[in-house]
């Protein structure tokens, strides 16, 4: 009864294995073949379980013959599966050559009464078929030969294949599963009259279970672990079933003497006790075995956990990233590891840290923002294993998976771990293969996710510290500029005094030369006096120009006390260009004024508007110089075009257009933010210019400012300012309303 129940339960487990694989993807031929294989095992075990339950020799023998249908086709279907899996043409052709043999055995087993089964052997644990010696030995030869060929092919693929790593690992699972499954042949021993309990169903469950795991679970466990667990399982349950059986056989007479017809209750109670204790014994032995097997893995996982708790104290970004790749590469013993950080401007992920165990390899410096790798990481928010992607791409023929496989291969990535802060992917950790050749386990992935979460927080802290330091530097530079502005009055006074002194000295010297021209002197002296007079005249001219420069700087730097008044656009542009020439090389660009003469005058503060136009010309110049250096276009000529026209609302619309590098789409929303700069170097700008422009135009002058930009082509800044005409019209309308 107990044996029948064990067989029935085992048949259902195997059938569920096959059905799960088939439902998972019925289009894959391997899945269909595996289901057929599991169905053959189901027929064998289910038929035998019924045979042990029913009464009557004829019906028992019939059910055993039905079971032989499954047994006969098990090796031939497994041959087909192996040939398909290994893509081995010889094994695939061999299937068609050998197919007549199981058909022959099944046909004659039913057609001829004593062909394979000629009666029953009676044992303590139940009746079992007695076989006809010569045909059954032929059947065993067919069975053994096929399993030997299959094992050799799988062994070769497991250790000498040139295919991808996951295929090799799966080959090893299937190889060891085949070896374990071949022990199911112990069930043939009782056919020859030997009193051996038929425990082959245990090996068959282990066999199909290992194959099922290799198919359904791409993130595979260590093969050694699976073999260890299988061995422990078979050994423990062999004892559980064997001890009660041995007790029943050895003590049967004694039990009959003391318990009579109910003697079988004692072995049944013992079997129940052993079955109850079995799982606990199995788990205890398994735990001890795994501790030994994964001693090294536990060690580096502990190291990574400790590293993840301490990295938050590192504020320097370079040191932090170097520490992460160094610890991971050394403790896990992998070939290499990289970290790619998100770049705010380009939205790409740039290589910021790398570590190689031995030989360096060329790796991409960036991961594109639209890459399949980033899309997959953002979608699943979990580590991606290359061997798993590779196997899925092969099984499902998915173009997206194939693209992901190619990109991971280009990155030399066996494992990619994302670093998220809320919904933002801030970093990507790329890891190579383990030096030992082992796969990354589920425990590894859990530890790496803990590490990545802590790394994400540490990276964000380091980035915040870096940004804060940059902001402090910008504030310090802005404060220095303000201090220089305050000092401008005193400096200009001192410079003007020196310039006036030089002018007076040069004027006195010129007067002396004029008075002494009438004196007699040689030609050489006269020529020298002419040169000196020319030099002194140039000194006076430069003194005058220097004075103009000082007055202009003083006017620009002083806080304007002047009220709003009439401002000529041409004069405003002239003054802004004059100021700009002391900072930039205005000769490297052309400024085109594309507006009609006679435009109405602007109602505004001249000094503030001068600062607005100065900042815009300065920004346009930097953008054009960046395009010139980055794109290196032949015949490129930097140009600023200034257009202006009346607006219907009594205002003037001014457009300043440059053909510079433009502004990236992701930066355009932040362009008026204080301390945000798009310039190549923070030394070129404080990030305050556009912020000041917006404040002066919109708050001080009640105007409007906005822009349109296309990266690589240029920028247009649109400014709307009130005009004197518009102001007068408003006043007239106000008087008319009051009247």
Image (cartoon, rainbow, N blue to C red):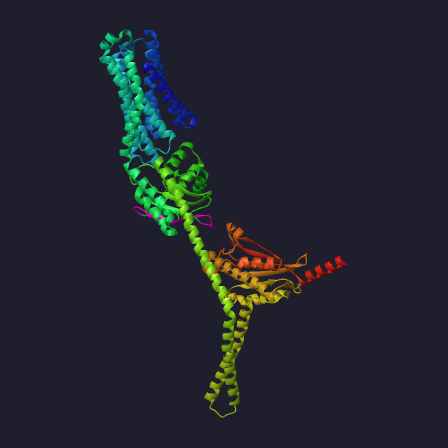
Residue 283 lies, with reference to residue 409, above or below; the image says above
- Residue at the farthest bottom position: 520
Residue 437 lies, with reference to residue 79, above or below; the image says below
Determine whether, in the image, residue 220 is placed left or right of residue 672.
left
Number of numbered callouts drawn: 0
Residue 396 lies, with reference to residue 120, above or below; the image says below
Dividing the picture into quadrants, the one containing residue 607 is bottom right
- Residue at the farthest front position: 258
Q: What is the quadrant of the N terminus in the image?
A: top left
Determine whether, in the image, residue 89 is placed left or right of residue 481.
left
- Residue at the farthest right position: 739
The answer to whether residue 681 is visible is no
The answer to whether residue 47 is visible is yes
The location of residue 727, given as percent across then percent down, is 68, 61
Q: What is the quadrant of the C terminus in the image?
A: bottom right
Residue 565 lies, with reference to residue 359, above or below; the image says below
The location of residue 57, given as percent across then percent down, is 32, 7
Dividing the picture into quadrants, the one containing residue 166 is top left
Residue in view at x 53 percent, y 63 percent: 589
Give yes or no for residue 352 being in the magenta stretch.
yes
Magenta stretch bounds: 343-359
Determine whether, in the image, residue 518 is placed left or right of residue 396.
right
The residue closer to the viewer here, 261 or 675, is 261
Give yes or no for residue 436 being in the magenta stretch.
no
The residue closer to the viewer here, 646 or 468, is 468
The location of residue 233, given as percent across then percent down, is 29, 25
The location of residue 311, given as percent across then percent down, is 36, 47
Dividing the picture into quadrants, the one containing residue 60 is top left
Residue in view at x 30 percent, y 43 percent: 331
């Amino acid at each position: 009864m107990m044996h029948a129940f064990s067989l029935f339960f085992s048949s259902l487990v195997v059938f569920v294995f096959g059905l799960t694989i088939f439902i998972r993807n019925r289009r894959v031929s391997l899945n269909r073949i595996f289901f057929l294989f599991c169905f053959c095992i189901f027929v064998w075990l289910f038929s035998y379980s019924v045979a042990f339950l029913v009464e009557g020799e004829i019906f028992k023998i019939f059910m055993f013959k039905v079971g032989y249908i499954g047994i006969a086709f098990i090796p031939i279907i497994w041959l087909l599966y192996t040939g398909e899996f290994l893509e081995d043409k010889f094994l695939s052709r061999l299937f068609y050559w050998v197919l007549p043999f199981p058909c022959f055995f099944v046909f004659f087993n039913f057609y001829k009464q004593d062909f394979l089964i000629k009666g029953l052997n009676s044992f303590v644990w139940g009746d079992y078929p007695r076989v006809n010696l010569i045909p059954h030995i032929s059947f065993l030869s067919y069975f053994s030969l096929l399993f030997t060929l299959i094992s050799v092919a799988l062994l070769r693929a497991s250790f000498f294949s040139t295919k991808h790593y996951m295929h090799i690992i799966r080959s090893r699972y299937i190889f060891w599963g085949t070896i374990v499954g071949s022990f199911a042949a112990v069930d043939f021993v009782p056919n020859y009259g030997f009193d051996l309990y038929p425990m082959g169903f245990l090996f068959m469950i282990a066999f199909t279970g290992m194959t099922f795991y290799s198919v359904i679970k791409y993130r595979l466990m260590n093969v050694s672990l699976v073999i260890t667990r299988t061995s422990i399982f078979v050994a423990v349950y062999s004892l559980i079933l064997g001890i009660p059986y041995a007790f029943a056989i050895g003590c049967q007479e004694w039990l009959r003497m003391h318990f009579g017809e109910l003697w079988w209750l004692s072995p049944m109670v013992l079997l129940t006790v052993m079955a109850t204790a079995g799982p606990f014994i199995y788990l205890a032995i398994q735990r001890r075995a795994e501790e030994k097997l994964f001693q090294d893995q536990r060690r580096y996982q502990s190291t990574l956990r400790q590293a993840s708790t301490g990295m938050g104290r590192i504020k320097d970004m370079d040191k932090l990233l170097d520490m992460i790749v160094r610890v991971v590469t050394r403790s896990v013993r992998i070939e290499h590891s990289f970290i790619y950080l998100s770049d705010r401007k380009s939205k790409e992920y740039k290589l910021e840290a790398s570590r190689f165990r031995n030989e360096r390899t060329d790796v991409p410096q960036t991961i594109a923002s639209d890459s399949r790798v980033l899309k997959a990481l953002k979608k699943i928010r979990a580590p991606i294993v290359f061997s798993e992607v590779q196997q899925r791409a092969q099984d499902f023929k998915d173009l997206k998976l194939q693209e992901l496989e190619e990109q991971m291969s280009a990155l030399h990535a066996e494992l990619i771990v994302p670093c998220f802060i809320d919904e933002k992917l801030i970093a990507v950790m790329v890891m190579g293969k383990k030096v030992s050749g082992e796969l990354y386990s589920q425990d590894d992935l859990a530890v790496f996710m803990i590490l990545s979460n802590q790394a994400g927080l540490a990276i964000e802290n380091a980035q915040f510290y870096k940004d804060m330091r940059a902001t402090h530097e910008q504030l310090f530079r802005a404060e220095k500029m303000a201090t220089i502005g305050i000092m401008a009055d005193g400096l200009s006074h001192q410079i003007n005094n020196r310039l006036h002194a030089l002018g007076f000295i040069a004027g006195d010297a010129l007067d002396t030369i004029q008075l002494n021209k009438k004196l007699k002197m040689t030609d050489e002296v006269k020529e020298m006096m002419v040169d000196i007079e020319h030099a002194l005249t140039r000194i006076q001219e430069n003194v005058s120009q220097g004075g103009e420069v000082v007055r202009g700087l003083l006017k620009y730097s002083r806080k304007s006390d002047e009220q709003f008044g009439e401002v000529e656009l041409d004069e405003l542009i002239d003054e802004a260009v004059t100021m700009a020439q002391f900072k930039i090389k205005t000769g490297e660009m052309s400024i085109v004024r594309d507006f009609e003469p006679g435009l109405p005058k602007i109602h505004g503060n001249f000094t503030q508007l001068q600062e607005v136009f100065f900042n815009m010309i300065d920004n346009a110049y930097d953008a054009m110089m960046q395009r010139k250096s980055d794109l290196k276009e032949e015949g490129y000529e930097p140009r600023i075009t200034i257009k202006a026209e009346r607006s219907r609302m009594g205002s003037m619309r001014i457009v300043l257009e440059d053909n510079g590098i433009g502004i990236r789409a992701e930066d355009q929303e932040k362009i008026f933010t204080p301390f945000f700069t798009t310039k190549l170097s923070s030394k070129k700008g404080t990030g305050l210019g556009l912020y000041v422009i917006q404040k002066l135009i919109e708050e001080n002058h009640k105007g409007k400012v906005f822009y349109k930009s296309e990266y690589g082509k240029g920028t247009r800044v649109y400014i709307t300012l009130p005009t004197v005409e518009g102001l007068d019209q408003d006043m007239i309308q106000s008087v008319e309303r009051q009247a």
